[in-house]
Amino acid sequence: MDDDPEPVLAPLLAAEGLDAATARVVLAAWCVVRGRHERAAGLLDVGRDGWPTLLRDSAAYLHALALFGAGDHEGALAASRRLFAAAVATRDRAAYVTARFVAALTYASMGEMEPARVQAFHVLRSDARAGGVLLSPDRSLRVLAAATALVRRETTAAPHLLGLVDDGVAGCAALPYGDEDWTLAMELQANGNLGGAAEVLDGIAGRSRARGHDFAADVTQLAGLVVSYDPRRAAAFARTVAPAPGTLHETHLAGWRALHEDRDPEALLAVGRRLQDLGARQQAARAYVNAMALFRAAGRAAEAVAAREAAHALQGPGEPLGAPVAGGRWELSARERQLLALVARGMTNAEIADELSLSVRTVESHV
């Protein structure tokens, strides 16, 4: 993956016809995998009339992935909708899967887990497969479906979905959620071992980076921070991806620093407003709720009420109030209630870990 294929493909790119179209798609796929999303989008931002169906659909899928990777989430969703419409019109099952995958991936990155779940579950119910398309998302989409179930605390669905992942479904390790160890990370997460899950995700990200799968590594590192925030890993991620100001990555990092390190409610309000502008409504609500909690802890009741109202304004009918970034919903699990009782007795994290046969990092994550 270290050898840039562009010098070899350049003569074909300058030509016309099938060879030129094929060269564009192949080079774009390489650029997406390597995280060169702007270059990939530029390669595919051309007229595709007359291209064979396989190349045309592959180009549409890769273009949508490139827009997502470049941080243009609105553009990625629009591209996935166009691909979906074409798939329905032609009854192309592979294009149907790739369109749903891009939409699910984009919604999940925005923290909109319900629409992400809907996109993934449509594919699972249809049993459609992308098959041999470039960067096939068949395995990744199933892992992503299980991830949305975990985030939503759907404890019955998550184990079943994890079983589907390993049910003979081919994967592409160059894609986010494509590495086989994702199932291990989610099993650890489902059982409350957040520190262990984050360590597995760190391993996946390192392995992906070493293979030149920078796109997959970036998404995996971000997921690891969601599962278990660590300032050192956050700083390493910031250095690796050099997120541009105003992007989701940069905004996530700013929000986590404000919550976990600086304990700064004003900064969280600013993060919430930026998330709103980026269309990440649920994550914005969570930022406001976290700001509310910090304002309350500081005895700033009026500002806490204003932050809570800002969160409520983002909720649709029947939706739960946004939850803290690191803790899922407000409802505590049985394990969390158990830990809370021990904390109330004045026990240290090390003592709790020994009492419950857990690692100290797991106890810290729960606390």
Image (cartoon, rainbow, N blue to C red):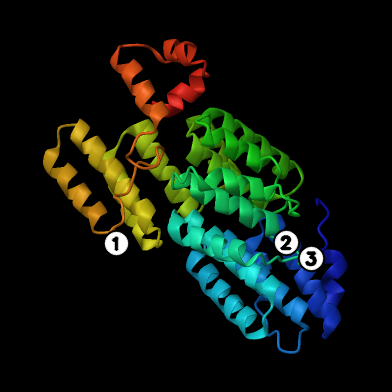
Picture quadrant where residue 220 is located: top right
In the rendered view of the protein, which quadrant contains the C terminus? top left
Q: Mark 2 points at which residue?
A: 136
Q: Are the residues at dot 2 and dot 1 in contact (C-beta closer than 8 Å)?
A: no
Residue 76 against residue 315 in the figure, above or below: below
Residue 152 against residue 337 in the figure, above or below: below
What's the distance in space between the residues labelled 3 and 1, CA to CA? 39 Å
Q: Name the residue under label 3.
A: 132
For residue 65, the mark is none
Q: Are the residues at dot 2 and dot 3 in contact (C-beta closer than 8 Å)?
A: yes
Q: What residue type is labelled 3?
A: Gly
Q: Which amino acid does label 2 sit on?
A: Ser
User: Label 3: few (<14), some or many (≥20) within 10 Å?
Assistant: few
**Residue 293 % position (x, y):** 25, 37
- Which residue corresponds to the image point at 49% horizontal and 24% vertical from the top-left? 362
Residue 63 visible within the image = no
What's the distance in space between the residues labelled 2 and 1, CA to CA? 34 Å
- Which residue corresponds to the image point at 52% horizontal and 15% vertical from the top-left? 357
Q: Name the residue under label 1.
A: 316
- Which residue corresponds to the image point at 39% horizontal and 29% vertical from the top-left? 334
